[in-house]
Image (spheres, grey):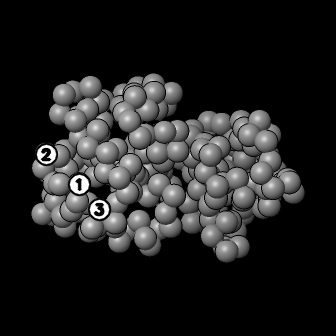
């Protein structure tokens, strides 16, 4: 399992500018990346990820709490499918997010998606399997890989927080080309998840 110290040593060697600019946040990084270990935990994490799409943390947490309450305190594929869309709408979910949660639940029930099995395949294969489900795009898949599966080498080029943090750190123009961002991030491999955590921390501090 990759460790924080391995990641920091790598950043210092391949990208001294990044290492120095994020040094204030090195101590706050987790020693190792945590991962959810059961299907129930992974399902709840994926539901949370869908709810978080294009929302701030506080709003996403409030809606997640209401969605869980609507499911009588138990987030399962069965409870999601049994809950009417109108109840989820009252909880604050958009029609698209409701459909995504229902499609995820159907995929798990018919065994076309096995969240626990994703722990055993590559990042690319895990993302591909997730994105077969309606409403799960690159960002959702990347967040799930980072925060639910604890994968160490994930970078989300579509995440606005990461984009803005990189533009500030490297003096890039606003809306820098994806190719530029990806080329910089490639240097951080195989620890791009740790790099992303550092970028988010610099972004939070500056906001």
Residue beneath the point at 35% across and 71% down: 62
Residue beneath disc 1: 85
Residue 90 showing in the rendered view = yes
- Judged left or right of residue 106, residue 196 is right
Work out whether residue 198 or residue 137 is closer to the camera in this orientation and state it: 137
Label 3 – label 1 distance at C-alpha? 6 Å
Query: Looking at the image, do the residues carrying marks 2 and 3 touch, with CB atoms under 8 Å apart?
Result: no
Residue 3 percent coordinates (x, y): 53, 47
Q: Which mark is residue 78?
A: 2
Number of disc labels: 3
Secondary element type, mark 3: helix
| Residue neighbourhood size for the residue with mark 2, other residues' Cα within 10 Å, grouped as few (<14), some (14–19), many (≥20) | some
Work out whether residue 153 or residue 52 is closer to the camera in this orientation and state it: 52
Work out whether residue 14 or residue 174 is closer to the camera in this orientation and state it: 174
Query: Looking at the image, do the residues carrying marks 3 and 1 touch, with CB atoms under 8 Å apart?
Result: yes
Q: Quadrant of residue 13?
A: top right
Residue 141 percent coordinates (x, y): 46, 40
- Judged left or right of residue 155, residue 130 is left
Label 1 – label 2 distance at C-alpha? 14 Å
Q: Quadrant of residue 100?
A: top left
Secondary element type, mark 2: helix
Q: Nearer the viewer, mark 1 or mark 2?
A: 1
| Residue neighbourhood size for the residue with mark 3, other residues' Cα within 10 Å, grouped as few (<14), some (14–19), many (≥20) | some
Residue beneath disc 3: 89
* 1 or 2: tag closer to the N-terminus: 2
Residue beneath the point at 35% across and 52% down: 95
Secondary element type, mark 1: helix
Residue 90 percent coordinates (x, y): 27, 67
- Judged left or right of residue 48, residue 140 is right
Work out whether residue 132 or residue 150 is closer to the camera in this orientation and state it: 132
């Amino acid at each position: 399992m990759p460790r924080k110290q391995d990641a920091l040593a790598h950043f210092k060697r391949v990208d001294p500018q990044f290492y120095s600019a994020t040094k204030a946040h090195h101590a706050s990084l987790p020693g190792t990346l945590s991962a959810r270990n059961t299907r129930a935990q992974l399902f709840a994490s994926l539901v949370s990820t869908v709810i978080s799409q294009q929302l701030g943390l506080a709003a996403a947490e409030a809606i997640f709490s209401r969605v869980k309450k609507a499911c009588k305190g138990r987030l399962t594929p069965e409870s999601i499918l049994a809950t009417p869309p109108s109840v989820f709408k009252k909880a604050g979910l958009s029609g698209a997010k409701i459909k995504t949660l229902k499609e995820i639940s159907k995929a798990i029930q018919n065994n076309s998606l096995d969240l626990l099995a994703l722990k055993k395949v590559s990042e690319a294969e895990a993302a591909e399997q997730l994105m077969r489900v309606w409403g799960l795009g690159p960002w959702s898949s990347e967040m799930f890989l980072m925060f639910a599966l604890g994968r160490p080498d994930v970078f989300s080029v579509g995440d606005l927080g990461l984009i803005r943090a990189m533009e500030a750190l490297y003096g890039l123009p606003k809306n820098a080309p994806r190719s530029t961002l990806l080329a910089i991030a490639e240097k951080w491999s195989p620890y791009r998840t740790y790099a992303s955590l550092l970028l988010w921390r610099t972004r939070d501090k500056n906001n």
